[in-house]
Amino acid sequence: MKKKIIETKVIEKEYLGSSDVNKLLISVSVFCDRSVSVFEALVEYLIEEKNLKYSQIARLVNRNDRTIWTVYNRVSKKRKKIPKAPLKMSKVTVPLDVLVDRKYAVLEAIVVYLKQNYSFHEIAKLLNRNDRTIWTVYSRAGKK
């Protein structure tokens, strides 16, 4: 995993400039909207709030740029039916490089990262999910 993190840091510097590398912390409040998936919320946030391009996001999260386009297209269609709630930024953040490892789903990576400092109940409240969902996600990640 260290190798991928190092590669991500190089890519971040290449695409965002060395001064912006340390600013890629995603507030957990980005993931609280239950009308879209966690990955959809992340892509939407990075495109609309951080003004990143599909290719930049793809390299930062170790995905294909066509995947990023598809996800953003899907969330845009959902937003026509269900408008986005105003974003209230939380002090709790997740570094973007946590999401690089394709072994884990985005929610799994976030939960595993947060579990280092928070209980299942606290994580569930932060992510607007059920406690049992968080436990299940963490359990599945542990089996991988």
Image: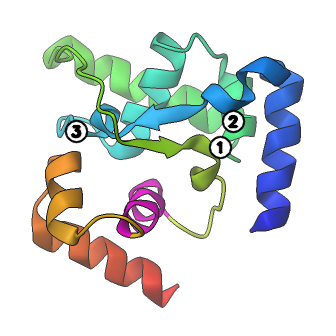
Tell me, yes or no, whether the two marked residues, 2 and 1, touch with CB atoms within 8 Å. yes
User: Residues in magenta?
Assistant: 105-115
Viewer-closest of 114 and 49: 114
Q: Secondary structure at mark 1?
A: loop
Please tell me which of labels 2 and 3 falls first in the chain. Answer: 3
Q: Of residues 126 and 67, which is closer to you in this image?
A: 126
Give residue 61's mark.
1
Give the residue number, with chain letter if any, for mark 2. Answer: 58
Compared to 107, does 85 lie above or below? above
Residue 14: x percent and y percent? Answer: 89, 26
Does residue 6 belong to the magenta stretch? no
- Describe the element under mark 2 as helix, strand or loop: helix
Q: Residue at x 45, y 85 (%)?
A: 142
| Residue sitting at x 23%, y 68% | 134
Residue behind mark 3? 32
Kind of residue at disc 1: Val
Packing grade of label 2 (10 A; few <14, some 14-19, many >=20) is some
Q: Amino acid at mark 2?
A: Ala
Q: Please report whichever mark, 1 or 3, sits nearer to the chain's N-terminal start.
A: 3
Residue 53: image location, x then y, percent: 67, 16
For the residue pair 104 and 19, the one nearer the viewer reads as: 19
Q: Is residue 66 left or right of residue 107?
A: right
Q: Amino acid at mark 3?
A: Cys
Q: Which mark is residue 29?
A: none
Up the image or down, 72 lies above or below 121; here it is above
User: How far apart in space, not on screen, are marks 2 and 1 (Cα)?
Assistant: 5 Å
Looking at the image, what colour scheme do you see? Answer: rainbow
